[in-house]
Structure formats: C-alpha cells, structure tokens
Amino acid sequence: KAGVTQTPRYLIKTRGQQVTLSCSPISGHRSVSWYQQTPGQGLQFLFEYFSETQRNKGNFPGRFSGRQFSNSRSEMNVSTLELGDSALYLCASSFSGDGYTFGSGTRLTVV
Amino acid sequence: KNQVEQSPQSLIILEGKNCTLQCNYTVSPFSNLRWYKQDTGRGPVSLTIMTFSENTKSNGRYTATLDADTKQSSLHITASQLSDSASYICVVSPYTGFQKLVFGTGTRLLVSP
C-alpha cells in the first residue's frame, strides 16, 4: 500500500516567485492536511481539505492557498515568496479525519 | 485553549540507556493521542496511538502511557540505539476528529555512542 507522496522533494525559489507543491494521499483517504515546519516552531497547521472542500484553515496569510481534486490529490500554492517561507512543508492524509499519515515533505528554500 | 506541552525540549543519552519523554495536554475531550518520531528533514512517523480509555501501548522498544485524569502521557524508550536520535512529537486529536490536530513542539533526542 503506497504511502503519502509529496513532490518535489526539494525546491529552491527566489523571493517574489510563486511555488506549487503536490501531495498524493493514501488510496481511499479523502482528508488532506498541510503543515509548515520551521526550526524551533514545530508544525504549524496550514489547511485541511476533505472531498475537495477546505474544512479548516490555520493562521497564515492569503499568499498560502490550496485545493483538492476529485481524486483527493492536493496542491498548495505560495505566491510572492518571502525568505521566511523557507521551511519543510508536510502533507498528511486521513480516511476519517482522525488518524493521520504524513508524507516525507517538500523542503522549500527561498533565496 | 487547546495546548500540548512536551518536556524536556532536548535530551542527550548514551547508547543502551533508557529514557522517558513527557507530554502534558489541555485538549478535552480528546479522541486519541499519538506519538510520532521525526528524523531530520523527513515526515513524522507514527509510533503509537492511544484512545482516552487506554493506559499503555507498546511498539517494540517504545512504550507510551496515558493518564487521562492528569492529562499526561509519556513515551519510554528502552535500550536506546543510535537510530533513535530524532524528534519525538506528541499529537492530540480533539474528540471531533475533523478539528485541527494539536501538536507539541517536540523533544529532540540525541543518542550518543
């Protein structure tokens, strides 16, 4: 059974650019959550999607957005990148919104 | 406010020794409490999951305990190995599963040879 797949694994962007990260959940999982992790900050919740609808949202600026497709795959987009957006972005999927399985993450570096 | 606090923030132990990590939470009621292990630069991997009615759960050398009355959980690692060096994160899921998970900031464990 394949796990949660995140692509790309590493990404380097310059300030002002935008970026799109992808997450393929475990087959059958309809809930996908996104998290930002920076050193010393722990995991910060970005948003959660369930059946193509955003169900929860964290306290991040509007530059951070996401969407979920009918096959449950999800993307998150960050526009007008800032240096402080450099982080490990993690995606987690769940069948019922209870237990979560995380992907390996996308390491974004903004220069 | 739902919070999860972990202690210590970091820990260094010698290979072969045991250690115990602590997690205190204020989430109530809650559905389950999980301990995750996260290697540097990787995603967290679930070690144990306990519902409010469970007291202990083991996964190899990892044993988690839960006291729902005092809202405390601990993760005990037996006979530590170098590969145990990682961050350990306590995560509490509120009773209504569709609410946001509440994460602790983690304990960074270094096992020294």
Image (spheres, grey):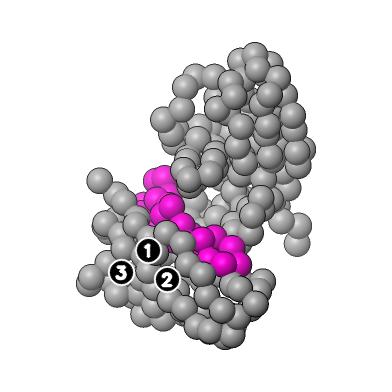
Q: Check if residue B103 falls in the magenta segment.
A: yes
The reply to whether discs 3 and 2 touch (Cβ–Cβ < 8 Å) is no
In this figure, which residue is indicated by the disc labeled 1? B7
The answer, for residue B51, to whether it is visible in the render is: no
Residue under the image location 65 percent in, 14 percent down: A16
Q: Check if residue B71 falls in the magenta segment.
A: no
Horizontal side, residue B20 vs residue B83: left or right: left
**Vertical comparison of B96 with B50: above or below:** above
Horizontal side, residue B74 vs residue B78: left or right: left
Mark 3 or mark 1: which comes first in sequence? 1
The crowd level at tag 1 (other Cα within 10 Å; few <14, some 14-19, many 20+) is some
Task: Please state which amino acid type lies under the numbered disc 1.
Answer: Ser
Q: Quadrant of the C terminus of chain B?
A: bottom right
| x, y percent for residue A85 | 58, 28
Magenta span covers which residues?
B85-110
Can you tell which quarter of the image residue A31 is in?
A: top right
The reply to whether discs 3 and 1 touch (Cβ–Cβ < 8 Å) is no
Instruction: Say what secondary structure mark 1 lies in.
Output: strand
Give the distance between the C-alpha atoms of the residues marked 1 and 2, in whole angstroms: 6 Å
Can you tell which quarter of the image residue B112 is in?
A: bottom right
**Of the residues tagged 3 and 2, which is closer to the observer?**
2
Give the total of numbered labels.
Answer: 3
Between A75 and A78, the one lying in front of the other is: A78
Residue under the image location 46 percent in, 43 percent down: A41
Task: Please state which amino acid type lies under the numbered disc 2.
Answer: Leu
In this figure, which residue is indicated by the disc labeled 3? B72
The answer, for residue B18, to whether it is visible in the render is: yes
* Mark number, residue B21: 2
* Labels 1 and 2 positioned on one and the same chain: yes
* Labels 3 and 1 positioned on one and the same chain: yes
Give the distance between the C-alpha atoms of the residues marked 3 and 2, in whole angstroms: 11 Å
